[in-house]
Amino acid sequence: MVAIRSRWGTWSTRRKTLFLSGGATLVLLVASAALDRELTSLPGSSTLDLGISDVATGAGTSVVGWGDGGRGRVGLWVDFGLILSYSVFLAVAAASTREALKSREVPSLVFLGYATPVVALGAGLCNLAEDGIWLAALNGHASSNDVSTAASLAIVKLFLIGFVLGYLLIGLGARCVRRPRVSDLPAPTEAVAGRGNGA
């Protein structure tokens, strides 16, 4: 009974973390989208455009436009919060998927699931470094090489996020197709015995 309660407590904690980080991610995505709409009216690009565009040719004017009124800085600080929330959400979701797959006899996915949360956090670190460069550029402390590095980090970040999302989708499919092992289900005789002892 202690083991069952311990396992349930772990899942309960993960569920709360998923709920809080997922909710924060949605709220910050909406806020970031709203700021992006404002920034598109300025000369240059929005935060999303800056992250995936060819910065070698357009970043200079984009960063200058962002600095007007400080809206670019606000967008980046909102993005810092978004990085934290989505990194935690993806890491916990990957860990929860891995634990659920342990009873589905999919050892390869379970093994991969130990690395996937680290990949999710790696994506967040790449995004954090990328935004740090943009913030430095807004303050006039970034070179053209730094801007190129930010573009590379954006590509790596998107690849890592895609990897994690792919794992979650494949894991969901495996959970739907494969049923839990019989050995993981409580035996009817044990359940009856447990009730008798409880009485």
Image: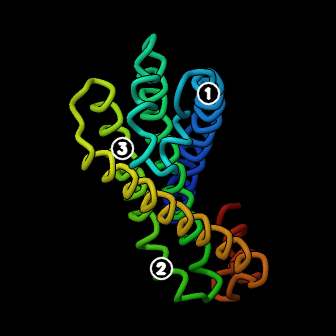
Secondary structure beneath dot 1 equals loop
Choose between 54 and 33: the one closer to the eye. Answer: 54
| Numbered circle sitting on residue 128 | 3
Q: Quadrant of the N terminus?
A: bottom right
Q: According to the image, label 1 marks what residue?
A: 40
Q: Position of residue 77 (x, y in %)?
A: 42, 27
Categorize mark 2 by other alpha carbons within 10 Å: few (<14), some (14-19), many (20+): few
Gap between marks 1 and 2 measured at Cα: 40 Å
Q: Residue furthest top?
A: 69
Left of 144 or right of it: where is 91? right
- Circles 3 and 1, Cβ within 8 Å, touching? The answer is no
Q: According to the image, label 2 marks what residue?
A: 112
Choose between 149 and 191: the one closer to the eye. Answer: 149
- Circles 1 and 2, Cβ within 8 Å, touching? The answer is no
Q: Residue at x 59, y 72 (%)?
A: 167
Q: Residue at x 56, y 56 (%)?
A: 11
